Amino acid sequence: MFRSMRREKSELKKETAEKILREGLFGVLSLSGDDGYSYGVPLNYAVADNKIYFHCAKTGHKVDAMKRNEKVSFCVVDIHEVVPEKFTSYYTSAIAFGKIKIVEDNDDPEKRRGLELLADKYSPNESAESRAKEINGKLKANLLISRNNKIFVTCL
């Protein structure tokens, strides 16, 4: 289904790649964009239960691309070090492939779960009241995207 890495010695163990995906601060979602151009968009995300969650507006380039083609990839870059004297840089990264699922139903527990995971990751010190207000507002205003294959991408 997917190609194996050309440089096999650079391939990370599955556990390491999953750790990079779980702990990264942001990732790049790659989609099939307009007129056959690829479209990569950086975004905040959360990972749980072999799923990647993110939220987005109900309309726009990203949503149009997701509706047109559910197949996506998601890349997170971890350690990065520029080595000028060697004209190179060292980094680790993980790429997940999967299919997008847009969760539009505000009553779908998956949508609330994704938003709670994002709040846990990016706003852990906010009060329960503040978090609930934000999550309840996003339930109405945003989509949750998700899917699975190797990783489930969920747009909130």
Image (cartoon, grey):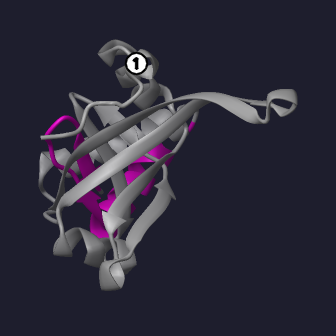
Residue 37 visible to an observer of this rendering? yes
- In the image, residue 36 sits, relative to residue 87, either above or below, namely below
The quadrant where residue 51 appears: top left
- For disc 1, the marked residue is 12
x, y (%) of residue 144? 26, 57
Quadrant of the frame with the N terminus: top left
Q: Residue at x 35, y 41 (%)?
A: 116
Q: Identify which residue, 93 or 153, lies in the foreground.
A: 93
Q: Residue at x 46, y 26 (%)?
A: 20
Residue 54 colored in magenta in the image: no
Residue type pointed to by label 1: Leu
Q: Residues within 10 Å of mark 1 (few under 14, many from 20)?
A: few
Tell me which segment is drawn in magenta: 126-155
Residue 136 colored in magenta in the image: yes
Q: Identify which residue, 128 or 122, lies in the foreground.
A: 122
x, y (%) of residue 38? 38, 69
Q: Name the element at disc 1.
A: loop
The quadrant where residue 149 appears: top left
